Image (cartoon, rainbow, N blue to C red):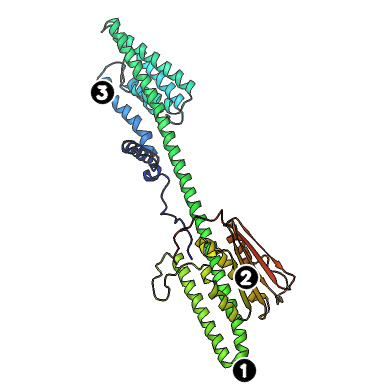
Amino acid sequence: MTAPTAARPSAPTSSGTPETLLGGVERRSDAAVLRWLMRVRQADLSHPWVRRWTMPVICALFAVPAVQQAADGASPGLPWMLVLTAVLCLPLLWRCRRPILTFAITSAASLVVLALDTATGAEAARVAALLNVGRSARPVQLAVCVAVAITQTSVAAFAQNQSHTTGMQTAVVAIVQALLVAAVAAAGVVGRVVNAYVVALKERAARLEVERDQRARLAAATERSRVAREMHDILGHTLAVIVGLANGAAGLTTTKPERGAQALRIIADSGRGALAELRRLLAVVGDEKATSADAPLAPQPGLDDLDALLERVRAAGPAVTLHTEGSPAGLPPGLQLAVYRVVQEALTNTLKYAAPTTSVRITITVDEAAVDLTIEDTGPSLAPGDDTESRGLVGMRERAALYGGGVTAGFNDRGGWTVRAHFLLATAPAPTEKRLV
């Protein structure tokens, strides 16, 4: 009485963890680099003030020697040196929010330093500003800023080295510095690409987590529906048999005590059988091993078990006959279970809604393409209305639909009820080992 095992939801994991994000990365070196990048990004997101203040402080530390020389009387003097250092370093606090403005301020301050023919050491702030332009600015803005930076660097190289080196050496220095400036801008672009890749990985991990949870919920809902259908089939049939036998036993206890006692024994056996099946079903749902003496492992019911089913129904009153055409013994176990459950549910409805003296004829026809099943009783009906929308009939239709067939039910011209089911062999699942419950 099992079904394919439902996928259990695994322990929840954060969509930002390296284990979740790197599930599809095969090379260890790539995974290690991405893991390190994600850790750096996570630390940056957790403590944003560290990155914000680190670069201005580093640039200010570069300016400490120049400030000391200015305090000792070197040109342009301590006040000017402090102002220039502050103008170069402080804008870096807003380099992420206003990269273009930060680059413009630091570039202007660098021009002032060049015009004063001095060096503060804090000109590295212009490099940091250009790096952030590469990380966030549009391509046109980046191209303009790179052109400005290269021009300014080349001018500074010629202005500072023209009296100390030859023209060729100065040109080489200018070219090298220009290439370094371009490399800084390229590093900013690479940082943007890496950041976008990490964000894409996180989004993909989040989608996979949502899909996994959806699959787990769908599997759980499917399993609950299957359990409800099986419990309805088992308990509904057994209770209907018990009610029919109890009604008969009540009238036989005084006139025919032996038959009354026999009916009561059948009631007890039916109840014990239903309890055993219920224990097996709940053990499977709870993923427990039903190995105790009270809940032994047993195969799914098939067509060979129809005789025992019909005996229980006959004991409750109706006269039931079974006719088969073809060879039902070779049908797949799953299809046999579906046919068995449809017969069981149809007989349950007969016990509920037809007179105890009704006659039931069951016909099973098997050919190379399909299995046709007919259950017909003679009534009369004891309950008003029909049962076409009952849970049992819905369950029968679902079982037939699994094999490309269908179920119809309605009143017949004999005053009773007829159920017809059709199962296609071509769409039947491939035979598998018999499941145990």
Q: Is residue 322 left or right of residue 164?
A: right
Q: Is residue 172 left or right of residue 239?
A: left
Residue 15 vertical position relative to residue 370 in the rendered view, above or below: above
Label 1 crowd (10 A; few <14 / some 14-19 / many >=20) = few
Q: Is residue 141 visible?
A: yes
* Residue lying at the far top of the rendered structure: 167
Image mark for residue 255:
1
* Residue lying at the far front of the rendered structure: 326
Q: Nearer the viewer, mark 2 or mark 1?
A: 2
**Amino acid at dot 3:** Pro
Residue 32 vertical position relative to residue 356 in the rendered view, above or below: above
The foreground one among 121 and 333 is: 333
Between disc 3 and disc 1, whose residue precedes?
A: 3
**Amino acid at dot 2:** Ile
Label 2 crowd (10 A; few <14 / some 14-19 / many >=20) = many
| Residue at 62% across, 76% down | 320
Q: Nearer the viewer, mark 2 or mark 3?
A: 2
Residue 29 vertical position relative to residue 19 in the rendered view, above or below: above
Q: Is residue 87 visible?
A: no
Q: Which residue is mark 2?
A: 362
Q: Secondary structure at mark 1?
A: helix
Q: CA distance from mark 2 to mark 1?
A: 33 Å
Image coords of residue 82 (percent x, y) = 33, 24
Q: Which residue is mark 3?
A: 65
Q: Secondary structure at mark 3?
A: helix
Q: Secondary structure at mark 2?
A: strand
